[in-house]
Structure formats: structure tokens, C-alpha cells
Image (cartoon, rainbow, N blue to C red):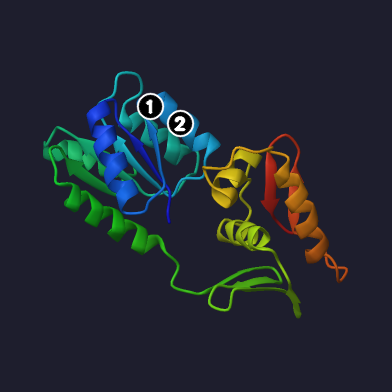
Amino acid sequence: MPKVLVVDDDPRMLMMLRRGLAFEGYPVLEAQSGTEALEKLRDHDVDLLILDIMMPDLSGLEVLRKVRTAGETLPVILLTARDKPQEHVQGLESGADDYITKPFSFDVLLARVRLILRKRTPETSELRYADLVLDLQRHQVCRGQRVLHLTPLEFKLVQTLLENPERVFSKPMLLDRVWGMEYFGDVNVVEVVISGLRQKLEQGGESRLIQTIRGAGYILRED
């Protein structure tokens, strides 16, 4: 399920959103300030941001501008208690995908969440980069004409990289996306799985696709 980051300085609103989204099956991260939200976005791979505008340190609009300036394209839903048309326009022009005025029905928010995520979901069942192909329907990965025999973790890792080619993933981000939020083991397990996956990807003498960016993480990129 897509991962959602909820940002609001009202603990009651955070609790309501966290419980409601979790009940629907969405993994939920939360933050109570704009600064904390940017930290969570840096350390975790997030699929949707639900962002309150009025916060004490960085406003939601400031957070949104920083996110868009950094080149992040994740969908953003703004929450606000203000209902002036010019504020709606300002939020949308800052890069928001949707705008919901408080108080609101959780069912309305949930419908907006589903609509936005459905628009972002690829219609194709095949992911491809260079000569690496992942078929979601067949649950199969090929490098050129070779079918790769991958573990479930390796398959999920390849899928994550193929969905975000030429994007750097830190070890914590890969742990979060591939292993899940409940994993609390050694972060170096990422290196072990990457090493084994590289051996399978390069077994036929092919070039390296999973590159190491020293001090940053890993990226799916051709030499």
C-alpha cells in the first residue's frame, strides 16, 4: 500500500488521520511541524503528503515550496481552516494536488486520497530500464533474455528501483520501502542484499545497473 505522511500540529487531528488511514490499510508516518515533516521526507520514501497549512515553525506552504524546489513530485493534499478562494489558488499554484477545508468528513478525505493515488498508479504491468524488465503480472524479472531467480526481498528491491530510476535511495529509505517500518535490524543488510542482487544481474557479463553513490546510497543508472 502507498505510504502516507500526515503533518499537523493538532494531536487530535493527527490521531484521527493516523487511525483512519491505518484502518484502510495505508502505512502512516506523522509529523507535528514543518521541520519534522522535511526530516521525515528526507529519511523515508513517501507516496502521499497530507499537509496542514497553519503550523508554528514552517507553514505548510513553505514546506510544499521546499518539496517542489527539491524536485519531488509526490502528490500533496493541503489542509486548512481558511476558506478564502485566493488561499485555495495560492495553495494550488504552490504545487498542491488538492485542497481540503477543515472541518471535513474523513470519508471525503479518503475519497480524495484514493483518487490522487489512482491517478499516480501506472496502468502498465511492466517496468523497464535499459535491458532490465520486471513483469508484475508474471512476478518475473529479466535481464536481456535471462530470467532472474530472485528472492522476495530482491524482487521488491528491483521493483522499488525500477519505479524510481536514476533516483538515489539511502539505506534507511530502502529499509523503509522494502523491509517495512517494522524492521529494526542492522542497516547493513541492505549492502548484503544489493551485493547478491548485483551478482544475479551481472551473471551474464552485463554492465552494472545498481550504482553506489558514496555517502548517499544506491541508484538505478547505466554506466
Residue labelled with disc 2: 38
Find the distance from the CA under tag 1 to the CA under tag 2: 6 Å
Local SS, label 2: helix
x 48%, y 33%: residue: 40
Asked if labels 2 and 1 touch by Cβ distance under 8 angstroms, the answer is: yes
Q: Quadrant of residue 50?
A: top left
Whether residue 144 is visible? no
| Residue 212, image x, y percentages | 75, 46
x 22%, y 49%: residue: 109
| Residue 142, image x, y percentages | 70, 74
Residue 36 vs residue 192: left or right?
A: left
Type of amino acid under label 1: Gly
- Quarter holding the C terminus is bottom right
State the mark number for residue 127: none
Q: Is residue 220 above or below residue 105?
A: below
Local SS, label 1: helix
Residue labelled with disc 1: 34
